[in-house]
Amino acid sequence: QVQLVESGGGSVQAGGSLRLSCAVSGFSSSINYLTWFRQAPGKEREGVATVQVGSRVTDYVASVKGRFTISRDNARNTVNLQMMDLKSEDTAMYYCAATSQSNWWLRFDPSRYNFWGPGTQVTVSS
């Protein structure tokens, strides 16, 4: 059973940076994507950044491209999200998730994810 636990959230002023980390245990070779999602109050959960496990190909939602970087540390079994130039609209609960589904066009579909962490709050004040 894959288990995910996020850390690194907090409060920061606009323009600041945060680094989120997701500890992955019980990793299965069937996992194809590790993805960071976020959900702001009253909004739907959206995919922010993903890494395809086999190829290490990454992708980002347009609103964070150039500001966020996803990386996987195999030695530490973590997947990290470096967030820079944070904006107030980045305020949300951030979740790490894993899926065994393998279709690229479903990489940001939260309904396709089997495993979720409890989340970590990011608050950006302007």
Image: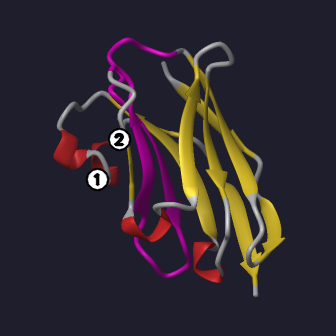
Horizontal and vertical percent position of residue 58: 39, 40
The quadrant of the image that shows the C terminus is: bottom right
User: Which residue is at 17% across, 37% downward?
Assistant: 103
Horizontal and vertical percent position of residue 29: 37, 11
Residue 34 higher or lower than 31, as above or below = below
- For the residue marked with disc 2, what is the amino acid? Tyr
Q: Do the residues labelled 1 and 2 touch (CB within 8 Å)?
A: yes
Residue 47 higher or lower than 4, as above or below = below
**Does residue 115 appear to the left or right of 33 in the view shown?**
right
Residue 48 higher or lower than 15, as above or below = above
Where residue 109 is drawn, which disc sits there?
Answer: 1
**Does residue 50 appear to the left or right of 120 in the view shown?**
left
Q: Quadrant of residue 117?
A: top right
Estimate how packed mark 2 is, as few (under 14), some (14 to 19) or many (20 or more) residues with alpha carbons within 10 Å: some
Is 51 included in the stretch rendered in magenta?
Answer: yes
User: Which residue is at 45% across, 50% downward?
Assistant: 49
Q: Quadrant of residue 41?
A: bottom right
Looking at the rendering, the stretch of residues picked out in magenta corresponds to: 27-54
Q: Which of 24 and 66 is in front in this view?
A: 66
Q: What element carries label 2?
A: loop
**What is the C-alpha distance between the residues marked 1 and 2?**
7 Å
Residue located beneath label 2 in the image: 113
Horizontal and vertical percent position of residue 121: 70, 61
Horizontal and vertical percent position of residue 21: 68, 39
